[in-house]
Image (tube, rainbow, N blue to C red):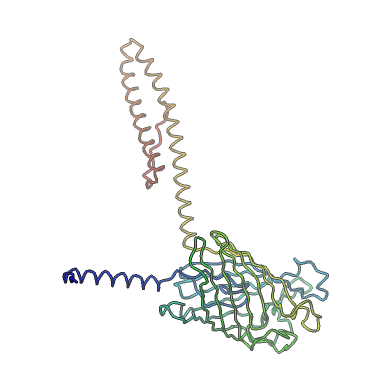
């Protein structure tokens, strides 16, 4: 068997090595997972529990409005659904691929708190391994220290003069949940290859926290009589599918340290709508003595959200402003062209009158009219050239001079 020349052999080895390295890199570099939907009150995760995930794009942001059906009245059955919904608003922003920070308004009172998360290890940081993502975070950072897990520990009281005063409801006085700290690990598991719409996948999270995940304020079974795996331990899972283009359907299940919850979120072009059932292990409504008409019964929850990138939005606003400026300039040029064309018609009539006259004194007038006519034609040409530049997307030029006043 003939051996290839040494030079050719080295070239073949180098090519084979390059192909091998490229294939290995292609296997290691995987597209990022499907972005996590927002929890009902505190940023990326499942329903109430967080996930160890931060967007890799700086300035990615989420706005979420959620509502939980909590009667909290002596006779909850006698109130409409709208009067029983405790609403929440949250904004979550992600930066440098490793940190998120946000603000949540807990109710209409309003109560509020900051939240954030630092992603210490991302799934895939150490190549193709089984190590999950790992993050630490905080919730309810602020002055409202006595919040329960539903964030209704503080209230507003009005006196006879109509003046308001912030109070702590007596049964929540022993809660100490500000701030709530936690640690969480999350592993992403692909279930299919990438298709035109996306890839089906699952994820699993396990974590531990204090405060909102652990503190029952000394209420015991009145606060939660079943559903806890272990004090402070929470877990969650999701199944992501892509039944339509530019969107996804996510099925969620979790234990938030107190209760078992499940639901689904539909997403299309950044707009999300979610429906959840919480405290599913409790079944129907319980008596007021067992949970103040607040705890220990299954509840209905809904959320609506929108996600986008602040920089992209700002860039889009700048582009829209530039388009508006060019549109206005185009309209001005069209008006100028029409005005100058009318002026040309009038000058042509005057020139025809001057040419038909045999008077010597009209010769000077005729020459003057020809000069004005040529000037107007040149101006129309410049305006038409600028209009073509705008329609072809060229940068704006200095504004065209206004037409001379008509004689």
In the displayed orientation, state which residue is furthest to the front: 1
Q: Which of 344/232 is in front? A: 232
Question: Which residue is depicted at the point 35% across and 11% down?
Answer: 357
Q: Is residue 188 above or below residue 268?
A: below
Classify residue 405 by image quadrant: top left
Position of residue 139 in the picture relative to residue 314 (left or right) = right
Q: Which of 213/404 is in front? A: 213
The picture places residue 173, in percent across and down from the top left corner, at 70, 86
The picture places residue 184, in percent across and down from the top left corner, at 54, 82
Q: Which of 263/336 is in front? A: 263
Q: Quadrant of the C terminus?
A: top left
Question: Which residue is depicted at the point 73% across and 86% down?
Answer: 225
The picture places residue 26, in percent across and down from the top left corner, at 38, 70
In the displayed orientation, state which residue is furthest to the top: 358
The picture places residue 261, in percent across and down from the top left corner, at 66, 76
**Marker count (numbered):** 0
């Amino acid at each position: 068997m003939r051996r290839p020349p040494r030079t050719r052999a080295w070239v073949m080895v180098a090519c084979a090595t390059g192909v091998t390295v490229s294939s290995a890199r292609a296997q290691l570099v995987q597209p990022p997972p499907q972005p996590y939907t927002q929890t009902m009150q505190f940023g990326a995760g499942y329903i109430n529990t967080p996930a160890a995930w931060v967007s890799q794009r700086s300035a990615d942001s989420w706005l979420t409005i959620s509502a939980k059906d909590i009667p909290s009245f002596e006779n909850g059955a006698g109130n409409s659904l709208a009067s029983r919904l405790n609403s929440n608003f949250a904004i979550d922003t992600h930066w440098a691929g490793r940190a998120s920070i946000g603000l949540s308004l807990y109710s209409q009172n309003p109560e509020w708190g900051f939240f954030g998360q630092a992603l210490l290890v991302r799934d895939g940081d150490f190549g193709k391994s089984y190590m999950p993502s790992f993050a630490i975070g905080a919730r309810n950072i602020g002055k409202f220290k006595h919040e329960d897990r539903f964030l209704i520990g503080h209230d507003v009281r009005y006196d006879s003069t109509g003046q308001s005063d912030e109070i702590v409801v007596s049964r929540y006085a022993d809660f100490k949940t500000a701030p709530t700290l936690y640690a969480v690990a999350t592993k992403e598991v692909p279930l299919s290859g990438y298709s035109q719409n996306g890839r089906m996948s699952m994820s699993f999270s396990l974590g531990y926290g204090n405060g909102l995940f652990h503190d029952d304020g000394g209420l015991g079974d009145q606060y939660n009589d079943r559903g806890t795996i272990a004090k402070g331990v929470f877990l969650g899972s999701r199944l992501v599918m892509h039944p339509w283009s530019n969107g996804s359907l996510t099925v969620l299940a979790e234990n938030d340290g107190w209760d078992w919850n499940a639901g689904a979120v539909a997403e299309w072009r950044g707009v999300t709508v979610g429906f959840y059932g919480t405290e599913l292990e409790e079944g129907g409504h319980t008596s007021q003595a067992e949970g103040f008409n607040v705890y220990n019964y299954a509840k209905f929850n809904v959320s609506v959200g929108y996600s986008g990138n602040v920089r992209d939005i700002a860039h889009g606003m700048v582009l829209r402003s530039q388009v508006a400026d060019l549109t206005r300039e185009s309209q001005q040029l069209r008006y100028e062209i029409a005005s100058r064309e009318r002026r040309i018609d009038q000058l042509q009539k005057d020139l025809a009158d001057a040419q038909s006259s045999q008077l010597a004194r009209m010769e000077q007038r005729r020459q003057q009219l020809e000069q004005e006519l040529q000037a107007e034609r040149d101006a129309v040409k410049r305006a038409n050239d600028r209009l073509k530049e705008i329609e072809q997307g060229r940068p704006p030029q200095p504004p065209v001079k206004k037409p001379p006043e008509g004689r």
